[in-house]
Image (cartoon, rainbow, N blue to C red):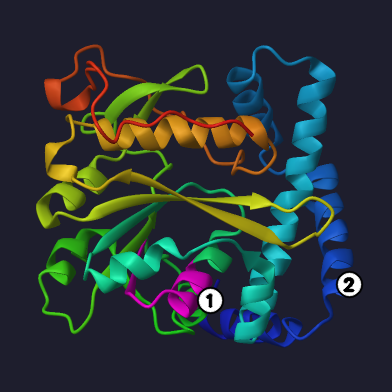
Amino acid sequence: MSQIPGKIFFSLLNALSGISWKNAFRLSNTLKFLLFDLGRYRKNVIWTNLKNSFPEKTHAELKQIADDFYLHFTDLIVETIKFRTAPPELIREHLQGDISIMDGFYASKTNIIYLMGHRGNWELANLFSSLCFTHECIVVYRPLQNEEADQWFLDLRTRFGAILVPMDQIFKELQKPRARPYVVVLANDQSPMPQTAFWTNFLHQDTGVFRGVETIARRYNLTVLYADFSKISGKRGHYHVTITPISLDPKNERPNGILEKQIRILENDIHCQPANWLWSHRRWKHRRPEVLKPEQLYTPGNALPGDISPGDC
């Protein structure tokens, strides 16, 4: 996208953010037809991911999950456009849940790292955290190659004071002196380089996981929390956040124990609400190396204080 057409396109997106929610979801219905029925956007990737992740489900069940995901995906597009100019009260209205756990951490001056998967609307989650947390909010992101697109998302994500930091600069950022406790927010369910990843079984498949989260938590002794964003049934565009402590003492966790806990919770959450995850992502494009280093594995032992198991739906 060249510079002038790009500026025009994103100016149109900003203008489009003023449409009503009713018309926004009408637009989503149209986008679903254009993207998936006509354009067949990544339908093979989506179907392969679903079939391998849910071998116990029938063809009809998988088709229903896929169809639900298509609408969820286009809803995310129009919701994100709406959130570009949405006032604070609308952000609070569309994402609700008990975040009182943060008050105690702030009072004790505890720094936190928040893990999440690509569930719910993660752009809404970023806005919510910078708007509603007393902690200083640091959001880790991957810069986009297109300058206009990158600036549009930067403007969106920093609307309520969040600090955006590329992943390769996060260690430098956390060394800076700060006036108040901070929370680092990042999604950790994308596909890393296989030679350096932590490898585990996730949704019936060998899966690599970024290890940087655990390195950050251990180096800066950050309390690790996990946030899940479920869709509220019958209220399109509305989500509920559930916060789960993963580790209050990261330096004493088993190697990759933090990541293993996160993966088990995420897996359970996906089973509870299957269409609410980014199935169009090529999550399993890398194969597990034949030989892994010890630091790429997790060795379970007897239960330790703080070990957790996924809950029911």
Is residue 263 shown left or right of residue 254? right
Is residue 253 shown left or right of residue 27? left
Q: Nearer the viewer, residue 145 or 288?
A: 288
Compared to residue 310, the image places residue 278 above or below, namely below
User: Three-letter amino acid code at disc 2?
Assistant: Lys
Give the residue at mark 1: 2
Disc 1 residue crowd, few under 14, some 14–19, many 20+, Cα 10 Å = few
Compared to residue 227, the image places residue 178 above or below, namely below
Is residue 140 part of the magenta span, yes or no? Answer: yes
The location of residue 61, given as percent across then percent down, is 80, 23
Magenta stretch bounds: 126-141
Quarter of the image with the N terminus in it: bottom right
Report the residue at 76% width, 24% height from top.
Answer: 62
Give the residue at mark 2: 22
Is residue 80 shown left or right of residue 169? right
The location of residue 111, given as percent across then percent down, is 23, 64
Label 1: state its secondary structure.
loop
Compared to residue 123, the image places residue 71 above or below, namely above
The location of residue 82, given as percent across then percent down, is 70, 76
Q: In the picture, residue 13 is in which quadrant?
A: bottom right
Is residue 120 part of the magenta span, yes or no? Answer: no
